[in-house]
Amino acid sequence: MRSKLASRMLCATFLALSLVVPTALAALPSPAKTAQRVDAAIAEELFGEETPLAPRSDDETYLRRVWLDLVGDIPTPEDVTAFLLDSSTDKRERAVQQLLASPYYGQNWARYWRDVIFSRTIEDRAYIAANAMETDLTGWLNEGVGWDQIAARFITSRGDVQERGSTAILMAQDGRTEETTAEVSRIFLGIQIQCAQCHDHPYDRWKREQFHELAAFFPRVGVRPVRGLTKRSFEVFGTDRFGRNAKKDNDRRPQAEHFMPDLNDPTAAGTQIQPKFFLTSATLPIGASDADRRGQLAEWLTDNEWFAIALVNRIWSELLGEGFYEPVDDIGPDRQASAPAAVQLLAAEFSNSGYDLRWLLETICLTEAYGRESRPRRDSEQTPFTANVPQRLRSDQLMNAILSALEVDESQPANRGGRQFANSPRKQFADVFGYDPSVARESVTLSIPQVLALMNSAQVNRAVTAGRSNMLGRLLTAEADDEQVILELYLCALSRQPSEEEIAQLLAYRDEVDDRQQAFEDALWALINSTEFQHRR
Amino acid sequence: MNPNIQRRTEIALRGNRVVGRRDFLRQMSALGLTAGACNWTDVLSASADELRSRGMACIVLWMQGGPSQFETFSPKPNHNNGGETKAISTSVPGIQIAENLPYCARVMEDLAIIRSLTSKEGNHQRATYLLHHGYLPLGGVKFPTLGSHVAQHIGDAANQLPSCVRIGERLANSGDGGFLGVDYDPFVLRSANSPPENTEPATGRERYLRRLRLLDSIQAKFAAGSGAQVVADQRKLVANAAEMILSPSMAAFDLEQEPAALRAEYGKGDFAAGCMMARRLIEHGVTFVEVVSRGWDTHQDVFTRTRELTAQVDQPMAMLISDLKQRGMLDKTLVVWMGEFGRTPRINPRSGRDHYPKAFNAVLAGGGVSGGQVIGETDDAGALVSERPVSVNDLFRTIYHTLGIDADHENISRVGRPIKLVDGGEVIQELFS
């Protein structure tokens, strides 16, 4: 452990130093090789000779899967056709790399993290920070900024919440010391230390005092309104200047030090607590500045093994339908991983990669575990990772899929800094279809309002009604062969070719309805409303 | 046969025959019978009364954020902790409540106030979960919410509306059907002042039914493979949703059908509309309705803010009880007013009160509960329960008891562990004397 003085100096030159990291890039572990080692570790830990493994998924399924997972959208019929016709053996690897090089990669994952952070806001007004967060994080991801640096930016942030996306967690928690502490630990370490906030937890090792020691890194942060001539906003700020009036309970102004409330006398001032990082017991002195506290915490936290494990586990869970630990934000030394060696290996190599998220995604996409066919979610007695799992699309993925399948443009200016997200069609869509991505996916269920929105909303029904200027209208005019129409509709919506049976089914339906246009409108409506469309297989 | 059965048998919920029959019908409807081949609701209507045990129903008025007991049902005008809030007399001699609740004071003979509710959870998320499930969140177990349990046990299987409805924007940690399945999820309505969204079929009825049939048939391939569970769930929800929107019972969601004079008596605002809609829904066979009021997290200006909130809640709550009573529905409808915890006895420097689960309030009315009484008491400072503590488990057990549901009924969770509706606790017998 570095001396306090040295670490503080380091903290001051934090960004400069982190520029040294790219020298490690030369030794970047190979994604393909790492994928093989992860598969081998899983097989070693979990599979016997008799364990039934789902076969490798077909090309259509794999392509739609990586599109949704990496760029949050479905491939066009042309993408699908080109991929099927490509006979080279490395086409999956190349498809993954091409998707990771697309700007939509950053946008897709920025939106994922937006949902992680804003699903837990204390007040709705925090949404004014969502646009800047999405924009900035999209940029960082596309530039290839390491996850350690991204985490440090969120933890140490200050500034106008509509201009600085890194303020998002602090804004979402209203700058409140204890809530911010809980979220930083949950999001970046996967550890729910706040359970120890009120009392020592019977099953966990963390004691109440350790939660408050972590909280002691954040007492000098606050959120305050800023009113300019033309706009109103909020600002995340940190301060080291305090008046003589000590902070009273529930006063949300920043305070010089953190106090742990006395449970027997909630009205008393409580005990002054020194900043101490619970995973390593490293401490900062009472009186340390806000910049030192948050800078030092960011460094200690991103250096810790649980930082890498939490991220690797989270992304693995998103891509395979199940993490090594579930739920992804309640892990830690007291939880049992389903394949400990595999997650350790992946986390160690992720750390070696310089916390390179693209490296991690490519590696996971190249594992056999990821590439297998999907099966219904397993029972607790069945072996994990013998198959992939159909995942219900996140709100943004579903909206993109609808827009792509129906060839509709999203008419939304992507200006930064405003309330755009808060008032956008995308947010309205998310109000119905959104869910907290940290929640175990098996508990994310469809609801009647969601079913009704896809069946009956004017937007969907307008788009499935054949007209001169829309996809279906153009298709029906250009293509006289109804089997071809059916093929095209399946490619547009489900990114796959229909089976013989499915073609026969729709041809029979056309004959029954005896109105070509109506029949295919109904077919497109049914495809968009199908469970398969709303999942990534 | 249909893959619905697979999901269903994972949960060994065979105690209630209604579930089996309802499921069977849902499956049949998913296979095309909703599409007009036969009106299965009619088939069942003869036995509808029998199915809905004793015709009981429940309305929860949920105060999100943690209402101050001092400013509502436990004023302490003679102690510093009571602040500026005065107490007023009620229709029951000897019982006083806060001046903020003049309408409730007039129906006190129907209210039973619990002043000694006590828990340990002072965190909004966990406490909201606790007061909706009777359990704290536990990794790996998908506890059903109160309303879903009620819907499963005494819901009217023949009804075309969902058995469990929540009125108010999505409420985090308020729960869903959990391991009971999507059939018992609450149907969430954003506001009672506007009709539920997207309930107008996009085409004429004939074509709509035809489309539903097509949708069902094109799902076969995914249903036969990896999508077995998810398609089964979606088929149920599509069948339930379609049945609802094509049914005449949709009128239950239309407050315009209520006389203007009566609407005025409920008062203005979303909560008032929600209370009135709750009554309409119960009349239309819905079994459990939750109406949400937000903004009770009064860390600042507790006096002014609680006054604003009670102005939205007091009149509709009292009117709901009078209206149910006048229609002869109160005996069979349990009304529960509660939030996730109470607020601190001490007033903080910003004239607010903080979270305080040690001693807080719930109010019960109807469903056979004897009104005009107060259960439990706190000390003069309002800090500690001095008489007859009531735990959250006691409260939940009492709610199930009132509705004629066996709180010791065991469901088997997916991991094979038996889970009672309520673990421990005792019925508050005074409520029925």
Image: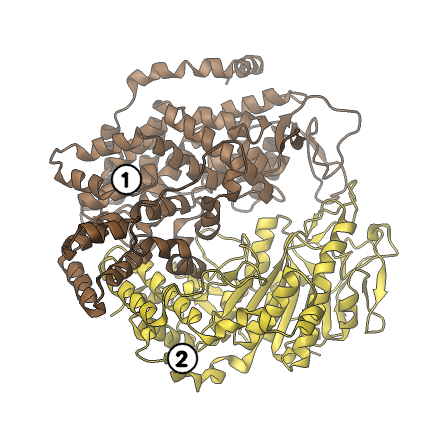
Chain colours: A brown, B yellow
Label 1–label 2 contact, CB within 8 A: no
Query: Which chain is mark 2 on?
Result: B
The percent position of residue A271, horizontal first and vertical second, equals: 71, 33
The percent position of residue A177, horizontal first and vertical second, equals: 63, 34
Q: Residue furthest bottom?
A: B46
Residue underneath mark 2? B41
Label 2, residues with CA under 10 Å away: few <14, some 14-19, many ≥20: some
Label 2 residue SS: helix
Label 1 residue SS: helix
In this rendering, position of residue B14 left or right of residue B133:
left
Q: Residue at x 19, y 62 (%)?
A: A506
Q: Residue at x 24, y 49 (%)?
A: A474
Q: Amino acid at mark 1?
A: Val
- In the displayed structure, would residue B68 be above or below residue A198? below
Q: Residue at x 56, y 44 (%)?
A: A195
* Number of marks in the rendered image: 2
In front here: B307 or A305? Answer: B307
Q: Residue furthest left?
A: A87
Query: Which chain is mark 1 on?
Result: A
Q: Residue at x 59, y 20 (%)?
A: A292
**Quarter of the image where one finds residue A524:** bottom left
Residue underneath mark 1? A66
In this rendering, position of residue A469 left or right of residue B288:
left
- In the displayed structure, would residue A394 be above or below residue B318? above
Q: Residue furthest right?
A: B78
Q: Amino acid at mark 2?
A: Thr
